[in-house]
Image (cartoon, rainbow, N blue to C red):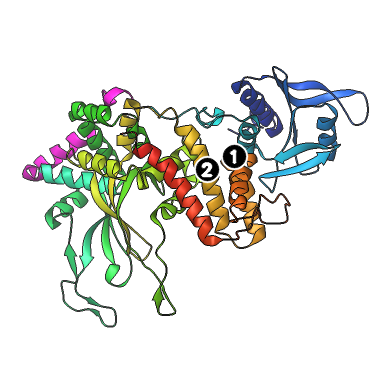
Amino acid sequence: MNPESAGKTWHDVVKESVVNLLRFYGFTASSEAPARIPEGGWGRADVVGRKGNTTIGVEIVDTGDVARDAKKLAMNNYDYRYIIVLRHSKKVDEVVVDGKRIKVLDIDSFEHELRRDLGVPPDYPYSSRTKEEKPPEVFVGASEREINRIIEELEEYGLENFADEVLNALGMVYISRDLPVEVRVHYNPMTGPTAPNEYESVNIKPQVLSILQRLNLVNISRKGTGYARKAFASPSERGLKAGHELILKRLREHKAELEELAREYGDKLWIILYGSLWYTPNHFSLEVVLKEYEYTPITGGRYAKKEDPILKAARSIFPWSYYSELSEHPTIPMFSNFLVKTALRDDALRFFSELERYGLTIQDTERNSRGEPIYDVLKAPIEVFQYLVTKTKRPANLGYYAQKFGVLYTILTIGDLYDPRVARERYEELLQKLELNESAVAEVLADMNRRGITSRLITDPEKAPFIILDMKGFEDYLKFSLATISDYFNSRG
């Protein structure tokens, strides 16, 4: 909705949003509150919040010219002071007036910065993410209209004997979203095809694939280069509807087994579900890696050093932006993803193997743009997450360990950056997005400094946050620290 058309300016909309957000965190908040102004006398502050003895002042301005508003916030002695700039080129900035810090940020960063300043625990919900979809119990009443129409059409064509194969193949395509159905077998990169039958069918029989196409359930495209070029089947719009119905049908049919599975795994299931979330453009799925294909470059006649699995798992987790649609604090699914790759890997593989018995998991491969394999994975559709997440709960102490992980992840990430300016920018971004208290980072770096591994935390905004003095010691320290919090969840049984 355009706020102007509703009689509100964007300034008004943001102001109302800030009031509601402060109230969500327990503040008594109001707009246009009395405040002293730089010109002398009294004027108005855009938003003021109070909870106990804690006060917050917020000014909302159109551009980065914030001198007057910063002075107003400093004059009124609010405990926390923010200026939200509607057209702001940076995520977070800061000005100091009379020794008081005023943060200058955009509306998207405000809640993160507020939570960070107030020390809101990571397991506390977000005001901006309270609409997480919770499906009804067992998807009661879900339609099977499209599946029934497919069966009717097969009967009209005299192909009813193929019904099971067609639906099973549709389920595979729906779960994969990009299933190889033909691979190149007779091909020379210098001369091209070496035989008339250049491609060979895989995963789906040619007759069944032909039926899927005739019923407008899949689209076929060729992608990749050289030997890696393949034909892939992806669900059409009709295939998406029918595939969704098919998965819901399987969930209903195996309700008892799935609920028993949820009881068996307990709150570990919550970690596995969130830790195996995998985003592909336009949709989420659940995936756990079976095998990673290594393309290790050769340097100076030698292969590059093999990376430690704990550090590799930490470096390869999906960043906070990946989880922006979830209602969870970003460090919680990030840490869950790390645990699925380390302490809970065997549990996750066993869980996905159980789902495979009910037609809810397939073995698939993630590929690069050339069609070459990156990961072999076990993959389940997002409906499995939506159903089973209602049958479990987050472990009570997960948020505590997730914050510890966030600090270690930040130090590891910054340690991989060589440019001081890039390292500083990335560091500030991580602190804000992960809502980390800088003192927690400083504490770890101080311990590393005592061991001769790094400098202490450097606060100069023109320099990198820290200097590594002993790279091996740096990696060993982080490996041990990450393994310690990972092993806690492995030892819970």
Q: Residue at x 64, y 40 (%)?
A: 439
Q: Residue furthest right?
A: 40
Q: Is residue 34 inside the magenta stretch? A: no
Name the quadrant of the C terminus. Answer: top left
Identify the residue under disc 1: 436
Q: Residue furthest front?
A: 451
Q: Quadrant of residue 91?
A: top right
Callout 2 amino acid: Gly
Q: Residue 406, which numbered label?
A: 2
**Nearer to the camera, 13 or 156:** 13
**Nearer to the camera, 431 or 484:** 484
How many numbered discs?
2
**Nearer to the camera, 19 or 391:** 391
Majority SS type along the magenta span: helix
Give the magenta part as a residue range. 136-162
Left or right? Give the position of 339 relative to 455.
left
Circle 2/circle 1 CB separation < 8 Å: yes
